[in-house]
Image (cartoon, helix red, strand yellow):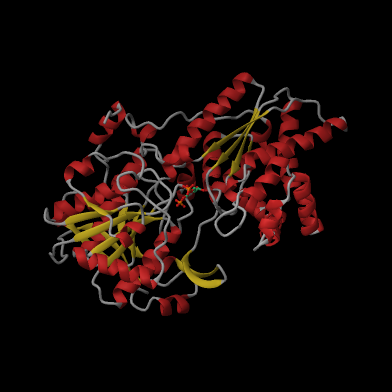
Amino acid sequence: MTLSSLQKARYEYVPKLPSMLRGGISEISVLEGAETKSVADCEKISALFPNTYGKKEIVFKKGQNTAPAKKQVVGVILSGGQAPGGHNVICGLYDAIKSTNPENELYGFKNGPIGLIEDDFVVFDDAYIDAYRNTGGFDIIGSGRTKLETKEQFAIVADVCKKHGITAVVIIGGDDSNTNAAVLAEYFAANNTGVQVIGCPKTIDGDLKNEDIECSFGFDTATKTYSEIIGNIGRDANSAKKYWHFVKVMGRSASHVALECALTTQPNICLISEEVAAKKMSLSEIADYIADSVANRAAKGMNFGVALIPEGVVEFVPEFSVLIAEINELLAGSRADEFNALPTWADKYAFIEKGLTKASMEVFAILPEGIQQQLFLERDPHGNVQVSLIESEKLFSALVADKLKARKAAGAYSGKFTPIHHFLGYEGRCAFPSNFDADYCYSLGYNAFMLIQYGYNGYLSKISNLSKPATEWVAGGMPITKMMNIERRHGEDKPVIKKALVELDGKPFKFFKAHRDSWAVETSYVYPGAIQYYGPAEVCDITTKTLALEKE
Ligand code: FBP
């Protein structure tokens, strides 16, 4: 394998641990705090988790390690979308496991949760681990989106664990995967398997966070990667002075990624899905909002700009959600075949016109034809519209173009509008982890083993005080049930970890709101440049603006 210079250099990087985890495993003791309660629906959650509910929050500190000595065989999986730093969680876990007892073993189950069901694994050794230290990606064992959620699956996992003598399973995943980790932990406890489950908070989307988890790993690196590119695009726009760049960034539900990139690069426009929903904005209102910036800048001679669009925004536009629901209904069952058999788009359009309500047809009619067709072509296995595949950056630029045309006709605008489109998503998910993510992830993995060694089950590895230097980080664990509430999912009440959306009264959004009107008209772009791995801490170890503002 040919290695890049950076890859070779990163192999040598020694991730920074919180002080309390430094100095050897024998010097890490545990401090138990108060018993916990779930954030809501306490009675229901406690009834669903009789063996794992209400456990104590814990913090590690310097002191004599009192954990019972026993051979540990740990299994680990990566679950869901890639996020920079996943390899380091496994490296930290491995190092803690082996430095406690070289006889301990770490099994990596392949391709996500399915690996545990199919008993498809690798047993890590030094050479294997060393080839992945401080690198991006999940290729160390692969990842997948199969869910571990049924009793039948749990029983298979219990058998697989028994077969290999596995004492604990570490699940590295997002809110859904960690919800399932809590259910698996309860199953293991209820069935006296003796197997523990520990979760680690992952997702570039940044929507697994709460009063205990300050941020999910990967968010730092992914947003810095996108911000570098957005900054470069802004500088190109300001150099050429002829294009409006519409940049969609990942974040299926929440707009944390878009907001962080906006705070870092100061584009002219950044939509925030949560605000769109709160204000019940229509597509037309959003288009007018962007068109105002285009027109105001054109009036100052600036026919260029940068607009950020969060991936999930269209689902937050109320009228659009209704339209999607109606389309799903319209094509339910055999009607999809009937629709597909129609020979021309004009025939199909007539079918749609007949089937939609007047209000939804009005929304449908203003969409560019390409997007209209996308709504009927891209269906998921259940036959539903795949909203995430909608090219919303193109949708909004087309709607803005229509608005500007109308304004021009009315003599209210005389600029030029030439849009260019980008989608930044996969580009950031496997970047070399920033020092922050390399350190945070290594600490999460190392800490996960401390939780295992001390016998905890159904806990999330928790590293906090993250806006401070790594030495001041605090390592510990929180029962996952503490983060749960009951939500309606697929027609059923389910215990889940609450997804964290952007809070409109939170400091990051408020900061953005206080500045965005001037960013919309002026050219205030910031060019953050590439992630730096070597150099002064104020350049290399900086956290996100979101975290800094939340913790100020
Ligand atoms: P996770 O929630 O699993 O971390 O994944 C998030 C994400 O990166 C989203 O931002 C994006 O919409 C999605 O994954 C893409 O998924 P896929 O890799 O299946 O195309």
Q: Looking at the image, which residue sits at the far right?
A: 410
Q: Is residue 280 visible?
A: no
276 lies left or right of 58? right
269 lies left or right of 19? right
Of residues 227 and 173, the one nearer the viewer is 173
Instruction: Give the answer, above or below, for where 99 lies relative to 224.
Output: below
Q: In the picture, residue 136 is in which quadrant?
A: top left
130 lies left or right of 398? left
Question: Can you say which quadrant of the picture contains the N terminus?
Answer: top left
436 lies left or right of 420? left
Q: In the picture, residue 118 is in which quadrant?
A: bottom left
**Residue in view at x 19 percent, y 60 percent:** 73
Of residues 551 and 368, the one nearer the viewer is 368
**Residue in view at x 74 percent, y 26 percent:** 298
Q: Could you say where residue 143 lies in the image, as x and y percent from the top left?
A: 37, 50
Q: Could you say where residue 396 lies in the image, as x and y percent from the top left?
A: 68, 40
Q: Could you say where residue 289 lies in the image, as x and y percent from the top left?
A: 72, 41
**Residue in view at x 59 percent, y 54 percent:** 505
Q: Could you say where residue 221 lies in the image, as x and y percent from the top left?
A: 41, 40
The tally of labels here is 0
